[in-house]
């Protein structure tokens, strides 16, 4: 039995290695590989199997590393890949480039799995580059469309910027720290650690579609639906995995955690504001992903990578389902919520905030002691309470009574706290996270509370000129696509027609 972890590790490595071959044998065989891989990974997760194998120098950190986080992400990626490939197999019937699309999708999934089991930053970066190149092929599937070509170009340029930032991080790690492995304590200078972490932040901004590099993700709505599901449910999540893996480094660089909080908050605010003003469903879902990735980045900045991974997986399954079912929502029409007095709306929001916060604090205290000593501390509890308060206070057209929603909030607050605590207990041993104290920790709940309160009051404030002006700007994405395009290309767009088509 002592050889069981090694045997299971060898089987998982073999399945990942043979996925590219399975891509050429057919969609059914590939999906079978992924189903087996997901089952093995979940079984190993329950058994708490840990194993590893390094190729060459330990400081280079190439090989396969299995722990709770890598097994969880392996199962998640395999399930998403299984579902997307099955949908694409039927969606593209009759398409002459169907085989190339399925093969490229499988290669993207295989590269994502290589990232999931990476023992160090070098292999993770190689997997990220492979994913990017595979996505570029998929984005060119409908290259006769101007929007698809622009999206492919934007993704390619943004990805290369992210690759440059990753290369800089690896160089700093290698020169100052002597190793690119995720494990082990930092042996270099504090300035080198901060520089490496800031380079990782820049790479995450580019690759995870955070503002101002979100334009490539918005442009992918021109791509076939299976690719949209794969991008929003899987590919952008690699940034969260990288931040979780490098949590030990960030804990020694509070300024880098502050940078994560700031860039995450910008996306967490801009994404929902633009999403609320979109009339196109897929574009609305795309901007939602920008906001959700921002929220996930904020959680990492608060020093709670376990909560971020929980959010990442939940968002991934939701967004895959939303995109794959987007065609069934084509004729859905939602009426406008009925405005109510400002005082009433604010009081309900404050009540929801209080009930959610108390429910979270009591649950954390019962299962884990002082919530302030958990990863993320009280600022994380506060932003979770802000999110839960929307259950009671958010404007809606449903007839569910507020008291019923308040009772639901009590259950949800306890369940959310238990899930977060469970994620931290499950993943913290794999991450070895020391305490982290970002200076701007309390900025996150304050900004997100302002956003939540604005959403609650929006039906009442909608007639104000300032709100109408905000709606016009938000409907155009605050003109970020044009600004991002100019930032990347260094020149104006070629023509007004091209500007209108810009993602």
Image (cartoon, rainbow, N blue to C red):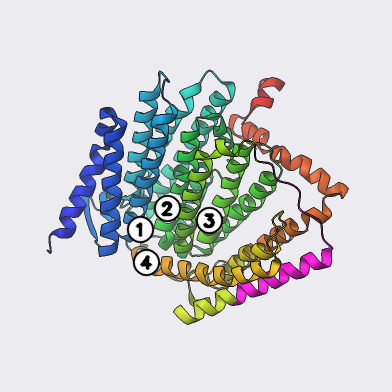
30 left or right of 146 in image: left
The first of marks 4 and 3 along the sequence is: 3
The first of marks 1 and 4 along the sequence is: 1
- Disc 2 + disc 1, Cβ < 8 Å: yes
- Is 338 in the magenta? yes
The residues tagged by marks 1 and 4 sit, at their Cα atoms, a distance apart of 8 Å
The first of marks 2 and 1 along the sequence is: 1
Q: Main secondary structure of the magenta part?
A: helix
Is residue 427 placed above or below 171 in the rendered structure? below
Dot 1: what SS?
A: helix
Name the residue nearer the viewer: 248 or 17: 17
Is residue 378 placed above or below 163 in the rendered structure? below
- The residue labelled by disc 3 is 296
Location of residue 412 (image quadrant): bottom right
Mark identifier at residue 426 = 4
Residues shaded magenta: 333-358
Dot 4: what SS?
A: helix
Mark identifier at residue 170 = none
Q: Residue at x 54, y 80 (%)?
A: 362
Q: Position of residue 228 (x, y in %)?
A: 50, 36
Dot 2: what SS?
A: helix
- The residue labelled by disc 2 is 241
Location of residue 129 (image quadrant): top left
Name the residue nearer the viewer: 293 or 266: 293
- The residue labelled by disc 1 is 69
């Amino acid at each position: 039995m002592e050889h069981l972890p090694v045997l299971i590790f060898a089987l998982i490595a073999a399945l990942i290695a043979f996925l590219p071959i399975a891509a050429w044998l057919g969609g059914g065989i590939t999906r079978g590989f992924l189903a087996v891989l997901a089952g093995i990974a979940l079984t190993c997760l329950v058994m708490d199997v840990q194993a590893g194998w390094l190729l060459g120098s330990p400081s280079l950190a190439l090989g396969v590393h299995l722990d709770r986080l890598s097994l969880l992400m392996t199962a998640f990626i395999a399930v998403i890949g299984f579902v997307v490939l099955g949908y694409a197999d039927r969606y593209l019937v009759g398409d002459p480039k169907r085989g190339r699309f399925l093969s490229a999708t499988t290669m993207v999934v295989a590269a994502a799995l290589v990232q999931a089991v990476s023992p160090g930053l070098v292999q993770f970066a190689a997997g990220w580059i492979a994913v990017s190149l595979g996505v570029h092929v998929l984005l060119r599937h409908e290259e006769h469309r101007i929007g698809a070509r622009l999206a492919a170009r934007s993704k390619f340029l943004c990805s290369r910027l992210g690759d440059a930032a990753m290369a800089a991080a690896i160089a700093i790690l290698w020169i100052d720290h002597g190793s690119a492995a995720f494990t082990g304590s930092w042996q270099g200078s504090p300035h080198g650690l901060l520089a490496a972490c800031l380079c990782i932040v820049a790479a995450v901004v580019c690759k995870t579609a955070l503002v101002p590099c979100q334009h490539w993700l918005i442009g992918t709505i021109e791509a076939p639906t299976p690719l949209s599901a794969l991008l929003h449910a899987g590919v952008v999540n690699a940034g969260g995995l990288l931040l979780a893996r490098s949590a030990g480094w960030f804990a020694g660089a509070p300024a880098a955690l502050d940078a994560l909080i700031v860039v995450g908050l910008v996306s967490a605010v801009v994404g929902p504001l633009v999403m609320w003003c979109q009339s196109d469903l897929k574009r609305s879902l795309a901007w939602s992903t920008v906001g959700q990735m921002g929220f996930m980045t904020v959680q990492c900045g608060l020093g709670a990578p376990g909560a971020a991974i929980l959010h990442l997986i939940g968002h991934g399954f939701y967004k895959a389902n939303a995109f794959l079912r987007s065609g069934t929502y084509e004729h859905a029409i939602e009426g406008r919520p009925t405005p109510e007095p400002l005082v009433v709306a604010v009081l309900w929001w404050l009540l929801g905030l209080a009930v959610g916060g108390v429910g979270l604090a009591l649950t954390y205290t019962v299962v884990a002691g002082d919530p302030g000593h958990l990863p993320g501390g009280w600022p994380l509890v506060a932003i979770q309470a802000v999110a839960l308060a929307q259950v009671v206070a958010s404007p809606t057209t449903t007839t569910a009574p507020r008291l019923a929603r308040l009772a639901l909030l009590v259950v949800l607050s306890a369940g959310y706290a238990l899930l977060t605590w469970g994620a931290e207990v499950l993943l913290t041993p794999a991450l070895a996270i020391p305490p982290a104290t970002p200076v701007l920790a309390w900025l996150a709940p304050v900004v997100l509370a302002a956003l939540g309160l604005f959403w609650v009051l929006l039906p009442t404030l909608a007639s104000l000129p300032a709100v109408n002006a905000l709606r016009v700007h938000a409907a155009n994405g605050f003109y970020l696509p044009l600004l991002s395009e100019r930032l990347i290309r260094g020149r104006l767009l070629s023509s007004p027609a091209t500007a209108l088509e810009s993602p």
